[in-house]
Amino acid sequence: MQARLGKVYLIGAGPGDPELLTLKAVRALAQVDVALVDDLVDRRVLEHAPDARVIAVGKRGGCKSTPQAFIERLMVRLATRGNIVARVKGGDPFVFGRGAEEAMAMARAGVPCEVIPGITAGTGVCAVLGVPLTHRGYTHGVTFVTGHTRSGAGPDWAALARAGTTLVIYMGMRRLPEIAGALMTAGMDASMPAAAVQHGTTQQQRHVIATLATLADSSRNAGLGSPALIVIGKVVGLADQVARIDAERRAVA
Ligand code: SAH
């Protein structure tokens, strides 16, 4: 007899702090039979999935990893055997997370797939750091880019420098000296405030706030590595003020 078709929830687990999960994610996790979890996801998220068999499918840059095609085949196989499957990814599934590839693979295989958004590192980490990404007095927008592309060719840094929006760079730590150099060559001010944040929103968060010219050295001296986010723009210079307001509010509470 053919098993009843299951379903896949493509869940964004948020940037790190397990409390930054959505209620929708918590409700979905309570129903799942199997959870396929990325290694950036805090294992406490799985406390919401008490009945789930957990399969870790790490995919960190440069580390031993589970091939994407294997993960997609596993998701299809589990769902066609009647399982409710959670594919739990860091941040938001559709921001640099290959969630789109997985959703398309489910569509091709005829497997129902529901996407549950998550707070992406770019917004969540910056908010906690006190960086107001789009403060209207300083910028007219924010651009999310990756510092690491499949082809090896990076974004058009000169165009980004000219655009004048806050820049949030995912997966950029390894190429930070080159990226900063390219932005300065394109005319971005060497004194532009810039930050690097590792393990943002978690207990292990470490960050440095510097300038475009000094960020690479400061990050190296502080021993910051992946996973980290780089943020460049005038709004980074507000972190002190915003964080101070936040600290005062907490002191009053
Ligand atoms: N889908 C995820 C991004 C996956 S790409 C999201 O929406 O957030 C992985 C990259 O995200 C890391 O290399 C790093 O640049 C960034 N990142 C994810 N979590 C982070 C965190 N807690 N602190 C800093 N950067 C983080």
Image (spheres, grey):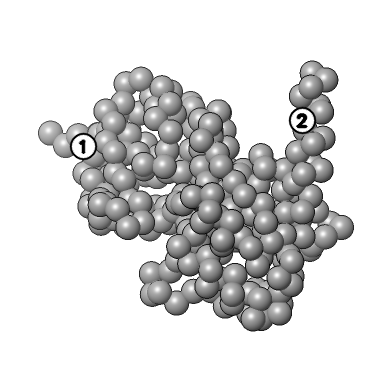
164 relative to 22, above or below: below
Is ligand 1 closer than 8 angstroms to the Cβ of mark 1?
no
Q: Quadrant of residue 87?
A: top left
Residue at position x 50%, y 62% from top? 172
Label drawn at residue 234: none
Residue at position x 49%, y 59% from top? 173
Q: Quadrant of residue 113?
A: top left
The quadrant of the picture occupied by the C terminus is: top right
Q: Element at badge 2?
A: helix
Residue at position x 56%, y 42% from top? 206
Outermost residue to the left: 1
State left or right for residue 31 relative to residue 2.
Answer: right
Q: Element at badge 1?
A: loop
Residue at position x 63%, y 74% from top? 183
Q: Gap in Å between the C-alphas at discs 2 and 1? A: 51 Å
Q: Amino acid at mark 1?
A: Arg
State left or right for residue 110 relative to residue 192.
Answer: left
Q: Pinpoint residue 197: horizontal percent, then vertical percent.
A: 57, 48
Q: Nearer the viewer, mark 2 or mark 1?
A: 2
Outermost residue to the front: 221
Q: Pinpoint residue 233: horizontal percent, then vertical percent.
A: 72, 61
Q: Looking at the image, can residue 90 be seen?
A: yes
Q: Pinpoint residue 217: horizontal percent, then vertical percent.
A: 56, 61
What residue sits right under mark 2 in the picture? Answer: 247
Outermost residue to the right: 137
Q: Pinpoint residue 163: horizontal percent, then vertical percent.
A: 71, 74
Mark 2 or 1, nearer chain start: 1
Label drawn at residue 81: 1
State left or right for residue 104 relative to residue 165.
Answer: left
The quadrant of the picture occupied by the N terminus is: top left
